[in-house]
Image: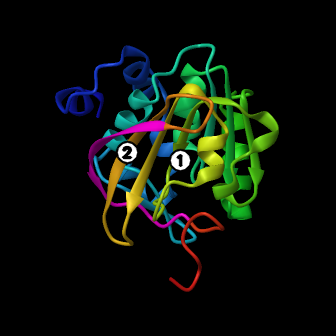
Amino acid sequence: MVELIKSRGVRDPLVLQAMAKIPRHLFVPSHLRDEAYADYPLAIGEGQTISQPYIVALMTEALELSSESKVLEIGTGSGYQAAILAEIAKEVYSVERLPSLAERAEELLKQLGYNNVYIKVANGTMGWPEHAPYDAIIVTAAAPSLPSPLLGQLKVGGRLVIPVGGAYSQELLKVVKTDPHGNYTTRSLGGCVFVKLYGKYGWKKEE
């Protein structure tokens, strides 16, 4: 899996080490464990997925994390992306809309010894303002546009990685906040397909 990720251009040694270390098969349903290390997304229940390993690595590398980073994750899901982040960063704050997924992820992350991940059940498009500002924010579901609360919770110079676009295909964007007034630059990391980000600054349920 890691060799495939490297062959596709991911170079950050911290990301590659984390991907090599974390047992991905523990984060997928038992009947899919034979496919855990294949490079495609897998269903984890509740209409949600665990992203393909390459996309996890690409997004994590784009965050430019260090051992002092404070990260906000929107969409805990299986907890796998949070574990990757926790291997590298100092603190990971993760918001999950679905209580069953949040509970399962929290339990597994604790079993694996990740005491620097904090999970809450809430609407992810609002972020987690109590712990802002963040060095980096990662959004693991697709939004129709950039959620303004997330930009507001990012440090100047901070990085936001988020899929933005339509319901069935998106662009993976890296957004860098350039000043305290909320100005930013964006760069596309390529096309992607994610499940919808629901909430006040995301998709509405009927859409």
Along the line of sight, the residue nearer the viewer: 67 or 182: 182
Q: Residues within 10 Å of mark 1 (few under 14, many from 20)?
A: many
Q: Residues within 10 Å of mark 2 (few under 14, many from 20)?
A: many
- Snapshot colouring: rainbow
Instruction: State the mark number for residue 6.
Output: none
Query: Which x, y percent locates residue 26?
Result: 53, 44
Determine which quarter of the picture holds residue 170. Answer: bottom left
Overall secondary structure of the magenta stretch?
Answer: strand
Q: Amino acid at mark 1?
A: Phe
User: Is residue 75 at all visible to an observer of this figure?
Assistant: no
Q: Amino acid at mark 2?
A: Leu
Task: Please report whichever mark, 1 or 2, sits nearer to the chain's N-terminal start.
Answer: 1
Horizontal side, residue 116 vs residue 88: left or right: right
- Residue ranking furthest to the right: 130
Q: Is residue 189 found inside the magenta-colored segment of the image?
A: yes
Q: Is residue 132 above or below residue 123?
A: above
State the extent of the magenta-drawn residues as a range.
184-197
Determine which quarter of the picture holds residue 8. Answer: top left
Along the line of sight, the residue nearer the viewer: 56 or 28: 56
Q: What residue is at 57 percent from the left and 55 percent from the top?
A: 147
Q: What residue is at 56 percent from the left and 23 percent from the top?
A: 87
* Residue that badge 1 annotates: 27
Along the line of sight, the residue nearer the viewer: 56 or 59: 59
* Residue that badge 2 annotates: 173
Query: Which x, y percent locates residue 65?
Result: 51, 21
Please identify, in this view, whether the residue under mark 1 or under mark 2 is nearer the observer.
2
Secondary structure state at the residue bearing disc 1: helix
Q: What residue is at 50 percent from the left and 82 percent from the top?
A: 207
CA separation in Å, label 1 and label 2:
26 Å
Q: Is residue 126 found inside the magenta-colored segment of the image?
A: no
